[in-house]
Image (cartoon, grey):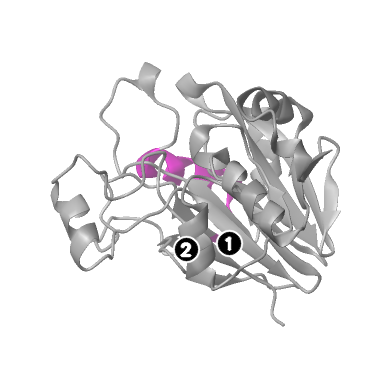
Amino acid sequence: MTEHLTFLGTGDSMGVPRSYCDCGICSEARSTGHNRRFRSSVMIHTDEGDLLLDCGPDWPAQMELLGKRLLEHVLITHPHHDHIAGLPEWLDACRWTGSRGTVYAPESAFGTIRSQYPWLERRLTYVPNDRGMHFGGWFIVPWEVCHGQNGTSYAYRFEKNGYAWAYCSDAIRLTEQQKKPLHGLNMLVLGTNFYKETADPATRSVYDMTEAVELLREVKPQAVYFTHMSHGVDIDAAYPLPPNVTLARLGMRVDLGHR
């Protein structure tokens, strides 16, 4: 099997379409579905099993997208609703199937998860990964990043056989120290809410695409996929972006090659 990831969600915290919105992009998402976006998540398919990265409120539909009935392993970036709200439904699935799931996250995330969902450990085992972890032959290291008005999040760097990639869905205004793990990447998955954000900078929590391009000039990844996109992004628009940048689509598969 060629190891790869599948984009199960490429939307921001509200997804697309937004229930209250009749903008052109939300309307298109309801018809042809090009801009249909579940909350951001990817499934990493390895020779030793699958690892879901974030388990938000669209988790049941994302499992249907894959035709998958069982889930064993979830990796969490941070304990916000759009990244963890599917955990109670996963617990229920574990209860019905008589299985037990494993959740990996930095220790600080588990405190919030426990306060919101104190019953989850009946069927889910929590494994702190602050010092890194191994899965499917990948060495996976989290690091804390600025999430703007929303505090902090975690990004992950994956390394195996000389190939390195990172997942950084919820970040903005990274410090020089926070940028260091983004250097030397074969691939970067990066969150970008809009092409050009117009809101007050103090209220923002995720890069826009113009800011992301400046970041890419610094860290120089070989291939880039933008995710975490709001209803301000049209997936079919010809935004002036570098040739190595792709707007991720729901269900898109990306191979994880090894040098």
Question: How far apart are the alpha carbons under marks 2 and 1?
Answer: 7 Å
Q: Is residue 215 magenta?
A: yes
Which residue shows up at 60% across the image and 47% down it?
Answer: 54
Sequence-wise first label, 2 or 1: 1
Question: x, y (%) of residue 216?
Answer: 51, 47
* Residue kind at label 1, given as amino acid type: Gln
Mark 2 closeness class: few <14, some 14–19, many ≥20 residues within 10 Å? few
Q: Quick check: 153 left or right of 13?
A: right
* Position of 223 relative to 79 (above/below): below
Which residue shows up at 55% across the image and 66% down it?
Answer: 6
Which residue shows up at 69% across the image and 28% down it?
Answer: 118
Which residue shows up at 70% across the image and 54% down it?
Answer: 94
Question: x, y (%) of residue 16?
Answer: 31, 50
Query: Please, what secondary structure does the residue beneath circle 2 have?
Result: loop
Query: Please, what secondary structure does the residue beneath circle 1 have?
Result: loop
| Range drawn in magenta | 208-223
Q: Quick check: 148 left or right of 222?
A: left
* Residue kind at label 2, given as amino acid type: Asn
The circle drawn on residue 165 is: none
- Read off the residue under disc 1: 222
Foreground of the two, 98 or 69: 98
Q: Is residue 31 magenta?
A: no
* Position of 63 relative to 10 (above/below): below
Foreground of the two, 67 or 132: 67
Q: Residue furthest bottom?
A: 1
Q: Quick check: 218 left or right of 73?
A: left
Cβ–Cβ under 8 Å for marks 2 and 1: yes
- Read off the residue under disc 2: 244
Q: Is the stretch drawn in magenta largely helix, strand or loop?
A: helix
